[in-house]
Each structure stands twice: as structure tokens, then as C-alpha cells.
């Protein structure tokens, strides 16, 4: 969480867990691991869920810059790249990482020194699909016929379209703020009550040369103490 403070407005939720022993045993058997202690890389798992797909890469690059990433074959994987241009399905970035030596020496992080663990990064709609896919197909152990798999792929495609539509609201928000800013520049709307968009437009008109909320969001600049970046979540 401290690592991603400047991206807080992009993040919906951060979850973590230690892998359940029964789940670990089942995975070891299913994958036929010969050296389980080394091959089981998700004994500790962290999941970062963003509001929009476009924010996933920002989070991933930040984590890569501040940790040691395991790039050995089959470890760190971008599942999005495994889907063809006409395919729909599981979309997530899986990073196998460990702390850099400088961080591992810090007292609060010392229990994690030298331990590889997994971080998954995906958007809200990608997460919704992943949960459905994991429960219905992966976890169930059922080999579904092709027509059923095709229907699952159609659901994944629909979620991808819906996620893109929600992201377009960001553009609508910006257009609305810019309309209000221009009206305040002209001395209009002085008696209109503020909502979040009007407030941002008013501040940009009043202080055009100062860094505003939108610019800080764009540059991933930490907000000053006491301010609330979550006003930007529309």
C-alpha cells in the first residue's frame, strides 16, 4: 500500500492471503511439482484490483521498479498477452516478486526476506470474470464441451466491452469540467451550487497556473495531507 500511494485514486481494492494448506496440497498434486517449496510461488498472494484496465500497467511498472521480479520461464506472466486478438477470457498480470535487499533489511519486512510471492493485478471487470472462471471451470474440475466454453468466452467479451464503456466516463468527466472552467473564466454560473466537477472547474479557472486535482492525477503526484483524491472517482 505504501508503495502505491501515488496511484491510490486508480486502485479499487488490495487483498492478501497466505495460501490454505489444503489448497496448496491440491495444487502440488495437480501440477505434479517435484520441488514444491521452490515451485509453489503463491504461498503468499496479493491481489491489486484497479478501477480501469488502463491503470493496470501503471501499477505493474511501479511494482517492477521497486522489487525483484522473477522472469524465469512460466513465473511472471501477463495473461492478457496470451489471448489472441479475437479471443476473450482470463486477463490478469501475475508477478512473482521478492523484496529488494534494502527493504528486506527493514525490521517490519524482515519476515519476508528472501521469500518469493505472487502479486496479481487486474481491473474490476477482469476480476469479475476471473472469479467466475475460477469457480465454474478451474476449481470445479469439469471438462465442459466446446459450446459451453464458447458461451463463457462471450461473457468475458461482454465484460470487456462494459469495462471500456465505464472508462469512457473519464473522458465525459473531463469534458464537463472543462466546460465549467470556461464558463467560470467568463464570469458565468457564479450562483450555481458546486458538485465535484464544478468545484474542480472553478479551482482551475481561479488558479490556472497551479497544479490541480486532474493534473496531480495525471502525473501520479501524491496529494497533500487532508485532501481527498477520491473525489475524482466517477
Image (tube, rainbow, N blue to C red):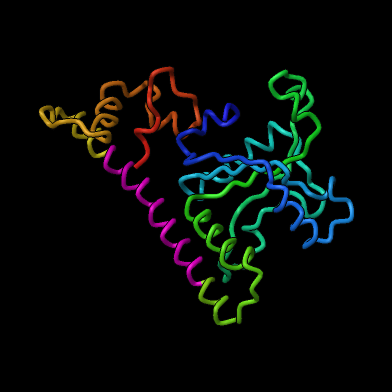
- In front: 137, or 6? 137
Q: Name the quadrant of the N terminus.
A: top right
Count the numbered circles shown.
Answer: 0
Please, which residue is most extreme toward the left here? 191
Residue 6 drawn at (x, y percent): 52, 29
Looking at the image, is 110 positioned above or below residue 76? above
From what the image shows, is residue 146 above or below residue 201?
Answer: below
What residue appears at the point 70 percent right and 41 percent down from the top-left corner?
Answer: 44
Q: Is the magenta region chiefly helix, strand or loop?
A: helix
The percent position of residue 174, horizontal first and vertical second, equals 33, 41
Q: At 71% from the left edge and 52% from the top edge, which residue is drawn? A: 22
Front-lying residue, 64 or 190: 64
From the viewer's side, name the closer residue of 210 and 4.
Answer: 4
Which residue appears at 51% of the width and 50% of the height?
A: 123
Q: Outermost residue toward the front? A: 22
State which region is magenta: 154-177
Amino acid at each position: 500500500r505504501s508503495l502505491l500511494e501515488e496511484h491510490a485514486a486508480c486502485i479499487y481494492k488490495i487483498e492478501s492471503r497466505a495460501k490454505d494448506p489444503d489448497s496448496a496440497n491440491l495444487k502440488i498434486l495437480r501440477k505434479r511439482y517435484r520441488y514444491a517449496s521452490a515451485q509453489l510461488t503463491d504461498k503468499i498472494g496479493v491481489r491489486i484490483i484497479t478501477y480501469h484496465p488502463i491503470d493496470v500497467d501503471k501499477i505493474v511498472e511501479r511494482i517492477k521498479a521497486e522489487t525483484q521480479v522473477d522472469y524465469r520461464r512460466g513465473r511472471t506472466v501477463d495473461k492478457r498477452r496470451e489471448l489472441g486478438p479475437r479471443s476473450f477470457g482470463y486477463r490478469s498480470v501475475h508477478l512473482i516478486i521478492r523484496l529488494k535487499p534494502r527493504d528486506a533489511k527493514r525490521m517490519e519486512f524482515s519476515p519476508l526476506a528472501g521469500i518469493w510471492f505472487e502479486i496479481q493485478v487486474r481491473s474490476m471487470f477482469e476480476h469479475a470474470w476471473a472469479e467466475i472462471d475460477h469457480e465454474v471451470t478451474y476449481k470445479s474440475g469439469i471438462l465442459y464441451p466446446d459450446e459451453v466454453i464458447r458461451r463463457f468466452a462471450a461473457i468475458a467479451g461482454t465484460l470487456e466491452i462494459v469495462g471500456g464503456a465505464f472508462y469512457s466516463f473519464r473522458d465525459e468527466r473531463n469534458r464537463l469540467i472543462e466546460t465549467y472552467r470556461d464558463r467560470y473564466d467568463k464570469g458565468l454560473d457564479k450562483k450555481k451550487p458546486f458538485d465535484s466537477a464544478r468545484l474542480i472547474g472553478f479551482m482551475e479557472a481561479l488558479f490556472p497556473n497551479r497544479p490541480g486535482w486532474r493534473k496531480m492525477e495525471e502525473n501520479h503526484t501524491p496529494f497533500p495531507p487532508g485532501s481527498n483524491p477520491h473525489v475524482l472517482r466517477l
